[in-house]
Image: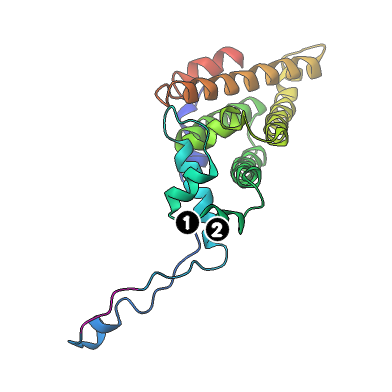
Amino acid sequence: MPGWHALTALCENQIFTIAAPMQNDETSSSHAEDGSSEPVAAPVRKRPKPGERRVQILQALAAMLEQPGAERVTTAALAARLDVSEAALYRHFASKAQMFEGLIDFIEQSVFTLVNQITERDIPGQEQAARIVAMLMQFAEKNPGMTRVMVGDALVFENERLQSRMNQFFDKIEATLRQALRGVAAADGSATPSVDAQVRASSLTAFVVGRLQRFARSGFRRLPSEHLEASVALML
């Protein structure tokens, strides 16, 4: 498959992180700037700005999921990590399920933004499919905690609607791959291009899920991108 090393260039510069709102601390350097020799009072712990605590909660949850062999994340453990009360968590999220929904929102927005960029490019469908697969592997490697959400390991004891959303996520990935590969099957002279494209798309999606599961269950030691070029070439 020519040009494989260029296939992932689209997402190399993408920063897959939950960004916190910018902080603007105007008081920290005021004494240094005016040359005052007066003693500086100890900084007062500031109340987070609107939306900032919500982001901090999601960041902490994602970080806890990145710990190999981590058990089910409880709100008590999450609150302790943030040094706040459990009640403080529920001022920003109605339930723990809503916290996981925040992570799923991040996964969907990050991944499908890049999927759209790939499919909008004037490149062959086979290459589009390869890029989508490579991008998903890179996303997982950059976000180990999110990988546990994607494959459902972190959702086992949570609300069923969370797993349903991740199932729909991969259904949408499969549909996108099918659309990209339909033209490839037709160009190959297939009498049933839609069926052939569905078979290839289903195989690729199962391959992606399998690689992500292995990554999560190996304690993040077996990288999803291992021998990726050769593996995808066998299916395309």
Identify the secondary structure beneath mark 1: loop
**Residue 18 seen by the camera:** no
Indicate the amino acid at tag 2.
Ala
Residue shown at the point (42%, 25%) measured from the top left: 219
In this rendering, position of residue 159 left or right of residue 81 = right
Residue shown at the point (64%, 29%) measured from the top left: 124
Residue 176 in which image quadrant: top right
Q: Give the x, y percent position of residue 13.
A: 46, 46
Given contact means CB atoms under 8 Å apart, are the residues at marks 1 and 2 in contact? yes
Q: Is residue 142 above or below residue 44?
A: above
Which residue is labeled 2 in the image? 88
Identify the secondary structure beneath mark 2: helix
Indicate the amino acid at tag 1.
Val
Task: In the rendered structure, find residue 84 and report the number of the disc placed on it.
Answer: 1
Q: Is most of the magenta stretch helix, strand or loop?
A: loop
Tell me which segment is drawn in magenta. Answer: 39-43
Q: Give the x, y percent position of residue 120.
A: 67, 42
Pointer 2: residues within 10 angstroms few (<14), some, or many (20+)? few
Q: Give the x, y percent position of residue 182.
A: 75, 23
Residue furthest toward the left?
Answer: 37
